[in-house]
Amino acid sequence: MTKSKQLLILGGTTEARELAERLASNPQLEIVYSLAGRTREPEFPPAETRLGGFGGAEGLETYLREQGIGLVIDATHPFAANVSRHAREACAKAGLPRLTLTRPAWRPEPGDNWTEVGDTAEAAGLVRKNYRRVFVTLGRLELDAFAGIPEVWFLVRMIEPGATPAPLANWEQVLQRGPFDREAEKELMTRHGIEALVAKNSGGRATYGKIEAARALGLPIVILRRPPPEPGETVESVEEAEAWVSAHLGA
Ligand code: NAP
């Protein structure tokens, strides 16, 4: 049998966890699953897990060398641009194969009312001008841009309560962990009299319910464009990522 290889999966997404679950039984692989450590109670795959940053690209390069990592899959969220840049730089320096697993972006359908924006400041400007009751599905750290708009009421969804309240004047929090289905999302938006949704173009099934619900209710969406992806080999499905691993194991 071929010697086993250590695979580092940079995670934090449904797809990363699914990949780790599917590869867990491969005897040629030792998997290390890495999370930033932002969520107090993350969902772990059946693999060795490490939590917390590496200390930039340099720290990651050192980690890769010290741990004898042979393959890296960057399966982080499409908006997690820093860790992806560090992964590209560190793998290039350490001479390691790196694959990006990312889900395809969502696309508007005919009749959808989407406004694409480049950042949260632009989103906040549009919200202030046009809406009074808004459902915001961004991370707590991204709410600052909406801080100075007391005339707008925000429904904010988080996985768990934050250490500090959201920096908003007028808001209510709903604590929920995905996946979210269309009907439940419709009910939530209707119950709160939502006029518009602010969301990232995350892609994937797990959080698509809000997009479908907004479509069904005829609500506008202010959607944040993705940061540019890192160059390099990229796949859009867990199956393709599995095939990439097999090819690198010589299977
Ligand atoms: P980011 O800005 O790209 O990363 C900030 C720093 O967090 C990185 O420089 C790195 O620290 C550390 N980090 C990020 N992901 C890591 C991982 N998987 N393992 C170890 N360290 C990691 O990322 P972010 O937007 O804050 O997202 C943090 C994590 O949450 C990511 O893993 C991502 O997959 C997940 N997530 C993000 C979003 C989103 O909308 N951004 C949504 C859902 C899930 P060092 O430089 O010290 O190594």
Image (cartoon, rainbow, N blue to C red):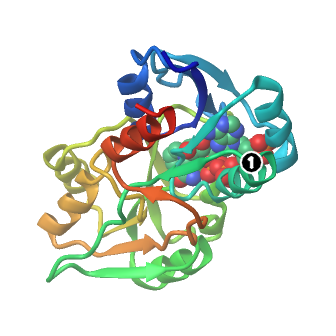
- Binning the other alpha carbons within 10 Å of mark 1 as few (below 14), some (14 to 19) or many (20 upward) gives few
Q: Position of residue 59 (x, y in %)?
A: 85, 40
- Closest to the observer, 71 or 138: 71
View extreme (front): residue = 1
Q: Position of residue 48 (x, y in %)?
A: 59, 16
Rendered view: 29 above or below 135: above
**Residue 166 visible here:** no
**Element type at marker 1?**
loop
- Closest to the observer, 184 or 44: 44
Left or right for 213, reference 161: left
Q: Quadrant of residue 49?
A: top right
Q: Position of residue 47 (x, y in %)?
A: 52, 17
Residue drawn at the location 57% of the way across and 19% of the way down: 4
Residue drawn at the location 35% of the way across and 26% of the way down: 22
View extreme (bottom): residue = 129
Q: Quadrant of residue 246?
A: top left
Rendered view: 116 above or below 200: below
Residue drawn at the location 32% of the way across and 52% of the way down: 204
- Closest to the observer, 226 or 71: 71
- Closest to the observer, 39 or 205: 205
Rendered view: 163 above or below 212: above
Left or right for 135, reference 59: left
**Residue 16 visible here:** yes
Q: Position of residue 172 (x, y in %)?
A: 45, 47
Q: How many marks?
A: 1
Quadrant for the C terminus, please: top left
Residue type highlighted by circle 1: Gly
Ligand 1 quadrant? top right
Residue drawn at the location 40% of the way across and 74% of the way down: 222
The answer to whether the residue bearing label 1 lies less than 8 angstroms from the nearest atom of ligand 1 is: no
Rendered view: 160 above or below 238: above
Residue denoted by label 1:
95
